[in-house]
Image (cartoon, grey):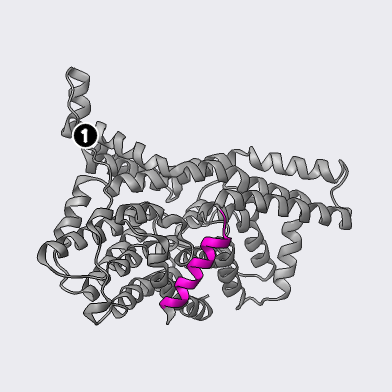
Amino acid sequence: MIARIGLVLSRISQRVVPDPFVLALFLTVLVLLAGGLNLWLGDAGTEDGVVATLWKGWLGGFSSLDGLSFALQMCLILVTGHALASSPPIQRFVKGIAVLPRTTAHAACLVAIVACVAGVIHWGLGAIVGALLAREIARAAAARGIRFHYPLLGGAAYTGLAVWHGGFSASAPLKVAEEGHFLADLVGTISTRLTIFSPLNLLITGTLLVVIPLFFAAMAPRREAELVPADPEKLGRLPTSEDTGGSGFLNKLQGSRWVGASIGLIGVGTLVVAAFRWDLGFDLNTVNVAFLWLGLVFHGRVRNYLVAITDGARGAGGIILQFPFYFAILGVMRSSGLITLISQAMSHGATTQTFPVLAFLSAGFVNLFVPSGGGQWAVQGEILLHTGSLLQVDPSTTVMAFAYGDAWTNMLQPFWALPLLGIMGLKARDIVGYTAVVFFAMLVLVPVLLLIMA
């Protein structure tokens, strides 16, 4: 029943929800109109005129160094996670455990566990490694003459995006942990001890890590006739990064397994020493550097790592194009007074206890239109933090409530499933009916835990 509801929602979204960049343009126009109306009615901040105030706010946000640096950070998160997922050790691990499941329930549970754990470690890794495992499980099953329900495995592979924003590559918690981040004037620097490593996050993310695999095991069809095996002709493959050889001293260095691995180990060792000796901050920059060096260690050969990074960069086009627009939207909301207006409206309908749930729900709604967690934080973060301050809500709680909401509706928004679908040879409508079950489970579970813990 719930799977059918999810399938209906998927078909509706495919018909009425346009490309994310089109949505960014639509939101830009909408915010400009709303901001202009607010300036005109309130007669606030219009010394240069309504149009000039809006233009300065938009251009200032579009060209801000905060926005450009945040976009590059998100690109690095994506490509370093993709490169790590395609490394030989990860692929050997995937092939090694792919032969373990004997039933669809076992296979779906295993894929969900791996995808969720990988998503907590690094969302770019989680977005890929679950698909690799599901694909290899299907191939191993076919070789043994076993039939599994392949679309269910695809849904399980996508669940890393349900827990990623409580993990080590979480955009909003890591961003507010940076010195001088773009909302520092409002809340200062918020340590990850209060967000990612807080009791609230450990409980909610830990609970999801247990519940999600159990849900997928329970959804496994029991009758043989209901099973939908994989079509071998539709199984995609990640581009290989095997050494292509070449003569000359420099080519040998680039193709040497020990040179690349040694450089990566030196980088990792330097980070470890810095963390212990100089209290290295745990933020987006640290995470990016750490996974960059780890990827080089896992690939070994510098040439192979470059191929993997280049392949991962193909998926970064949306981030590069859309992030300046998200910060331009933020600039307009600041210059027009919309942030204050929206914050005051939200504070009237919430209390200190209920606001985290409201922040969760609002973040989930906005994520349907701004599918990038980092971009969404740029648009929505200041509103939520300002509202939370009016209600005397701990800003770390507001950040994490936003994070859960952003991850929650990923289970209906298949934007980040595109790489997974390409690897597995599936379509969004094949998996969203099953991920919709996770959506409904989180709709009940996360607000209850927020009310208990926040």
Quadrant of res 348: bottom right
From the image, give the main secondary structure of the stretch colored magenta.
helix
Number of numbered markers:
1
Where disc 1 sits, the SS reads loop
Which residue is at 71% across, 64% downward? Answer: 343
Dot 1 corresponds to which residue?
301
Question: Label 1: how many residues lie within 10 Å, few (<14), some (14-19) or many (20+)?
Answer: many
Q: Is residue 16 magenta?
A: yes
Which residue is at 23% across, 44% downward? Answer: 298
Task: Residue 66: give x, y in percent of width and height.
Answer: 58, 42
Q: Report the front residue among 329 and 377.
A: 329
Q: Report the front residue among 21 and 344.
A: 21
Task: Residue 35: give x, y in percent of width and height.
Answer: 78, 53
Quadrant of res 369: bottom right
In which quadrant will I find the N terminus? Answer: bottom left
Is residue 259 toward the left or the right of residue 82 in the image? left
Read off the magenta span.
3-18
At label 1, the amino acid type is: Arg
Which residue is at 20% across, 58% downward? Answer: 136
